Image (cartoon, rainbow, N blue to C red):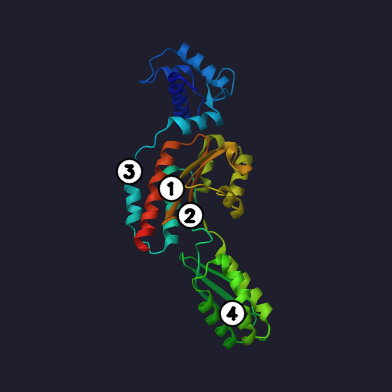
Amino acid sequence: MLTERQRMILNAIVDDYIRSAEPVGSRSISKRADVTFSPATIRNEMADLEELGLLEQPHTSAGRVPSIKGYRYYVDHLIQLGGIGEQDMRKIRGFFAEKMNLWEEVIDHTATILSQLTNYTSIVLGPETFQATLKHFQLVPINESSAVAIIVTSTGHVEHRTVTIPEGIGMDDIQKIVNMLNHKLSGVPFVKVKSVLHSEIGKELGRIVDSCEQILNVLETALAEGAEPRVFLSGATNILTQPEFQDTGKVKNILDMLDETPKLLQLFNSVPEGIQVRIGTENAVEAINQCSLITATFSFEGQSLGSIGILGPTRMDYVKVMSLLDYLSKDMSLWYAKRHK
């Protein structure tokens, strides 16, 4: 348990280090208007905080910097979420005043505005797989052996990919297959598409075409794309502007991770509701064990619509990021609610 004086000093060191990225000494703390004790007293308290594992001293003659444990104490016990600055609020209001008809547009714009407001990397996940359903399916022939499969989901996402059409399948057969799929699969969650394909549609396909198994495999491959969660990323290179990431090896590992959707999804595994903060080695992916990830969920009528994450250095402006995520996640839920009453 920290004393009130230790809490004040730790809070001051974290705040100063977040702003300056330089180790914080006792003299700079003593000059703060809210501090009334001497540099010698502050040095003694800093030594005690270091012993407790809350501070670290990079060099013998340098000041102190917060440890992972220090940041954790700061986030859990010292900070209070504040309001949004006037300039940031204007940008957010302007953002939600824009005419956006698709949920996917809202998610994409949210990723962009968050990276601009924080100067960190923003990651926004679209609706979870169990929520997305098939809205429309189309097969557009390119030639006799291939076609473009177009999948439109209930979330407004449009996916298209080229598939190979088995020999002996004509235009009439393709149209019959498409009509049947739209009749049988419209509104079916993507997590159930595979079982419906094989249990219900397989039998009817057999009455239309001989190469039933081949067609089923083609459809399964085409529709699998729609089941993948969407990840929207903005400000990936913002990490390059942070002084602690001048080491190209560290930056490369982070940028490589941001380029791999499975690893990005791993960051959000088992993310509880509300705002969550993972600092340094608390993160599941090794590439970002010198970063902090702050996440927030947004939902509608108890159903998760997705998650927002802000990735930055452990020397992150936690108050600003957490306040923005709290505000924006609520606004996104309200936007969705107004259009799905």
- Which residue occupies 36% across, 57% down? 335
| Tag 2: amino acid | Gly
Circle 3 SS class:
helix
Q: Where is residue 109 in the image (x, y as percent from the top left)?
A: 42, 55
Cα separation, mark 3 vs mark 2, equals 27 Å
Residue flagged by tag 3: what amino acid is it? Answer: Gln
| Mark 4 → mark 3, Cα distance in angstroms | 51 Å
**Position of 95 relative to 238 (above/below):** below
Give the secondary structure at mark 4. Answer: loop
Give the mark nearest the N terminus, 4 or 2: 4
Earlier in the chain: of badge 3 and badge 2, it is 3
| Helix, strand or loop status at disc 1 | helix
Specify which label sits upstream in the sequence, 4 or 3: 3
The location of residue 176, given as percent across then percent down, is: 56, 85
Residue corresponding to mark 4: 142
Q: Mark 3 points at which residue?
A: 87
The residue lying at 35 percent from left, 53 percent from top is 95
Q: How far apart are marks 4 and 2 (CA)?
A: 35 Å
Q: What element carries label 2?
A: strand
The residue that label 2 is drawn on is: 306
Counting from the top left corner in percent of width and height, residue 139 is at 56, 78
Q: Determine the CA span between mark 3 and mark 1.
A: 13 Å
Residue named by callout 1: 114
Q: What residue type is labelled 1?
A: Leu
Whole-number angstrom distance, CA of label 1 to CA of label 4: 40 Å
